[in-house]
Each structure stands twice: as structure tokens, then as C-alpha cells.
Image (tube, rainbow, N blue to C red):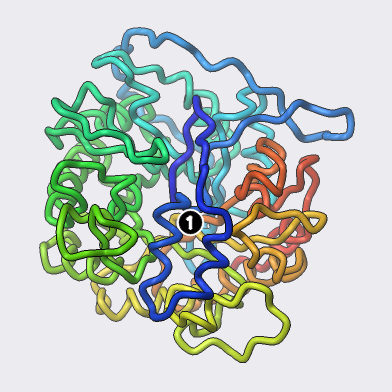
Amino acid sequence: MKPSSPSTNTNLSIIIGLWVGLTLLAGGGVFALVYWVMGGFDTAVEAPTPQPDQPLVLATAPLPTTAPATPVPNTTKVVCNYAPLAPSKFGYGIQSHVYVGQTDFEHWMSVIRGLGLQWVKIQVRWHDLEPQPGQINWSFLDGAMQSACSVGVRVMFSVVAAPEWTQANPMPLLENGEGVAPPDDYQVFANFLGQLVEHYPGQIRAIEVWNEQNLVREWNTAGGVNAAEYIKLLQAAHAAIKARDKGITVISGALSPTGVNCNVSFPNCQPSGRPIVVDDVTYLKAFIDGGGLNYADCVGTHSNGTNLPPLSDGQNPPPHTDQIFLGPWNSPHYSWALKSQVETYAKLLNGQKQQCLTEFGYASAIEGKFRPGFEFAVDTTEEEQGQYLVEAYNWMRDSGLVKMAFLFNLDYAPKGGEPDKDDNVIFSILNKSGLPRPAFDAISKMDKP
């Protein structure tokens, strides 16, 4: 999934109905053809104009346009009053869009704590924080971090997107205007992570190193997608993090479920050119064989909820009834359902590491509205959205295969666009007015043993 940006609203001008187009494709290699182009369901959003009937919507504070000089690192460890972990030690988490509405961080962190969740995922786009070398603007994160610590919510950072100054010859952006890449020197990224840990001593409990690096929009280098190169980045990052705080859980960047390998001739996938999409299982095998597990405490994964219940088998879906979106039936694949996807990865990991689902979620239409291409949202009622999320959390915890899981998302609806234009909104457990949807209530009432 594509990480959010605090300063831009990504324009996803794509082929309308790509998700519906899945129903016309055969075989398991279908998810990448949509997922890579559409950019996942985690994209930047704009804050709406507040209305009198929107009690939880926050006005967007102006983002700083200049970055102050990097302060002297604070090495005094902060003690946070963290919410107790569940007896099972499973990590219940959720993602919040902290960059929008930078006026009431403690409110949103308190909402997360009130839901009985112990973790929040915050995405960090390095190129937004350090547009010029040595000038890091921490103001994007300071308020959120202070509030999370004060109410006892653990923070997981997902860190991506190197600034252009770290690349001698940056690759051109993709046709849709996307495409981030690692730095030429991976140690420069490791140094940034070291500064991040030093700036928030004792406040970061997990770091996901990069995101969906099996897609070119997240690994836009001359050589293309390459597991061996990612392992080098992860190794440097792991060393930098652990040298400063051994208690931080290092999570490898979650892969995008794809099921297909593609190159520059995408979408025809001819056998020539640089790799731009690598099948998640193929990539994970290369990552394991290349020693990548030596540099991660947990393997990052993503699960993209559609209109199959989480405990289904995506390769053998139950008989369909009146569903509009027929992708799972026309193109069976393990990634259509959470359980079959987690179990597929677990077979490769063979007990060596647990998985950390840094994003999972289910969409449901709001007042019958959904963005074209997300027809599976109308197949899932708001009540079923909550039911599926609870089933997913419970199964992940009981499976023993998952260490922690982050629901996408808490608050992208009140901070975003309209449900028929912004796909983040239909995954949110709040509505456009900032009021709880049935899924919010379901998570709140869910036992968290």
C-alpha cells in the first residue's frame, strides 16, 4: 500500500473499473495488475472543509514550509505509561492519519486507547521530513509522538521515500506521477533512522523498514525490484536501530500481494526489461534464502480485504451468491482472503519468524457510495465490515502466526474526501462526520485476550 504524504494529495488517475476487470482475468497472477497501478488503498488525503455537524473533524494546521536545523539529539529516554499488553502478547493496532488535523493529537490517541488498542501505525516519508541534507523538520511528528506517549499508545513507524538529494541520478517518475526509491548509499537511510530513534528516545516501539518494495512505485531504481538489494538496506537499518534501542521491533517492509512477475512492458509482462512487479511469494523466498530474516524481528505483510470473509480460502472460495465483484471466483488466489494469505507466507517462514500485518482492512460503501473500481465495497455491509475485522483479529491472535496487526484505518474518512472519490474513506471505521461506524463499535466491544 502506498504510504501517505503530509504535503500532497496523490492523484490516482487510473483505469476506472480495474478491480472489476479482475473478473475478466484468469489465474492467480491478477492482483498485481490492479494493485500496482491503483497504489493500494493507503493514499494521501486532503482535509475536508469542517461543517457544523462534524464533531470530530479537525481543521488542518498549516504544514511548515521550511525546515529548521536539526537539533542536538535527545538521548534522555522518555518513559511512557503504555497500555498493558494483552495476556496473549498479541499486538492490537490501527493506523491513524496524523498529518491531517495537527491540532488535537491527544484526542485521536485517546480514541485509540479507548478502543482497547495498544498500537498506532504512523507512516514517515523521509523526503518530507528532510528535503535538504541535515535539515530535519520534526514538527510533522512531535505532537503525535508526545500525545501517544502521554496516553500510553505504542508507536510503529513505517519509514519510506528517500529524498532526491540521496540519489545521484533519480529515476523518472512513473506515468501516474508516483515512484519513490531508496538512497544510493543505504547507510544514509540507516543514519536517518538512527536520528529518528535518538529524537524520540524510548517512544518508538517498532519500525517497519520500507513498504511494498516488490513494486517499482516503492523501489524505483535503475535495476528495478530486487530482494538482494533490499536485504542490504534492511541490514544497515537493523544495525542502526538496534545500536540505539535493542527493544525496538524491526519489521521488514511488507510486500504487496501480487501473484505475478512483470517488467517494463507492464501490463503484458514480456520477459525483458527491469523488474517492476515481483510476485510476493517469489520475493519472500528470495528474501529468506538471501538471509533477510537475520535482520528482522518480524516479517511485514499486508492483507487486502475484499468481499470474502477473512477465514475463507482465496484459492477455493465459497459459492458466490449475489456478489457484484467476482474476482475471487473468476481468478482464485490465496491473497483474496486473510487466512489463506497468512498461511501461505507461514509455510515459507517455517516457524522462523512471525508476521506483522502492518496493514489489513475491509471496505464497505457509505450511503451506497464507493470509488469506481472498488465494487467489492458494496458487497460488504457496514455490519459485515465490523464482523470481518473482529474475525480477522481473533484468528490472527489465535493462529500464533502473527505478532501484531494494524487495522487500516481509524480516521481517514473525516480527514479525507468523498467516499465515491477517496477509497481510504470506505475503509475507515469512522464516517465523514467523524462519528463511529458499526465497525468502530465492533472493535470497541471486541474481547482482546
| Numbered label tally | 1
State the residue in front, 13 or 289: 13
Q: Is residue 298 left or right of residue 274?
A: right
Badge 1 element? strand
Residue 301 sits in which quadrant?
bottom left
What amino acid is at disc 1?
Glu
Q: Is residue 284 visible?
A: yes
Image height check: is 229 above or below 304? above
The residue tagged 1 is: 359
The residue drawn where x is 72% and y is 56% is: 440
Image height check: is 193 above or below 274? above
Residue 446 sits in which quadrant?
bottom right
Residue 104 picture location, percent across and down: 67, 27
Residue 30 picture location, percent across and down: 41, 70
The residue drawn where x is 54% and y is 83% is: 329
Image height check: is 144 above or below 12? above
